[in-house]
Image: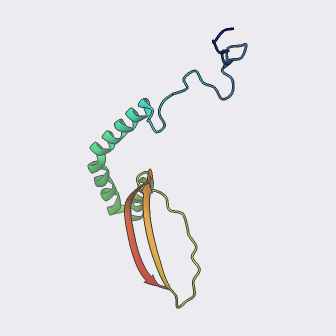
């Protein structure tokens, strides 16, 4: 009688891994960024940091002749920096005090909390 355990079958006859098994069971830890994507993000951030003053000048220059166009460009660029807000419908009686609390989050972290209290 042998104490050796029977090996667990993890591959098909064609050599592919069976569903639910992996050749690298520990794998990359959850949340670890892809190195190539991280480098691309860093490069884009560096380019944006370097050109930001020029972009502000271009929007101001455009705004002198076309304020509406400048605002449209500004709003389009803002979509890349700020999270889009979803519409929320609130129903209340006309004489009820309504309190709005707005919290912006990115990656689970609060970016800019804003509080406003108003009536009806």
Horizontal side of 80 relative to 24 (left or right) equals left
Quadrant showing the N terminus: top right
Figure disc tally: 0
Q: Residue furthest bottom?
A: 95
Asked whether residue 54 appears in the rendered view, the answer is yes
Residue drawn at the location 39% of the way across and 73% of the way down: 115
Q: Where, by quadrant of the figure, is residue 63 drawn?
A: bottom left
Q: Is residue 72 visible?
A: no
Question: Residue 20 appears at what percent x and percent y?
Answer: 66, 29
Residue 90 lies, with reference to residue 14, above or below; the image says below
In the displayed structure image, the side of residue 47 where residue 15 appears, left or right: right
Q: Residue furthest top?
A: 1
> Would you place residue 107 above or below residue 115 in this image?
above
> Which is nearer the eye, 82 or 52?
82
- Which coloring applies here? rainbow
Which is more toward the observer, 12 or 105?
Answer: 12
Q: Quadrant of residue 65?
A: bottom left
Residue farthest along the front direction in this orientation = 1
- Residue 72: % across, % down: 44, 59
Q: Residue furthest right?
A: 13
Q: Position of residue 42 (x, y in %)?
A: 35, 37
Q: Name the quadrant containing residue 25.
A: top right
Q: Position of residue 57 (x, y in %)?
A: 28, 54
Q: Is residue 28 above or below residue 44?
A: above
Question: Which is more toward the observer, 14 or 61?
Answer: 14
Residue displayed at 42% across by 60% down: 69
Q: Residue at x 32, y 40 (%)?
A: 47
Taking the spot 44% from the left edge, 34% from the top edge, the residue there is 37
């Amino acid at each position: 009688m042998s104490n050796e355990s029977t090996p667990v079958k993890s591959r098909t006859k064609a050599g592919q891994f069976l569903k639910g098994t992996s050749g690298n069971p520990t794998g990359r830890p959850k949340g670890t960024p892809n190195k190539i994507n991280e480098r691309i993000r860093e490069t884009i951030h560096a380019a944006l940091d370097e050109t930001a003053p020029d972009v502000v000048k271009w929007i101001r220059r455009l705004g002198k002749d076309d304020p509406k166009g400048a605002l449209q460009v500004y709003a389009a660029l803002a979509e890349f920096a700020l999270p889009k807000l979803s519409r929320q419908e609130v129903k209340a009686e006309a004489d009820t005090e309504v309190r709005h609390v707005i919290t912006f989050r990115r990656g689970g972290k609060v970016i800019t909390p804003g509080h406003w209290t108003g009536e009806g």
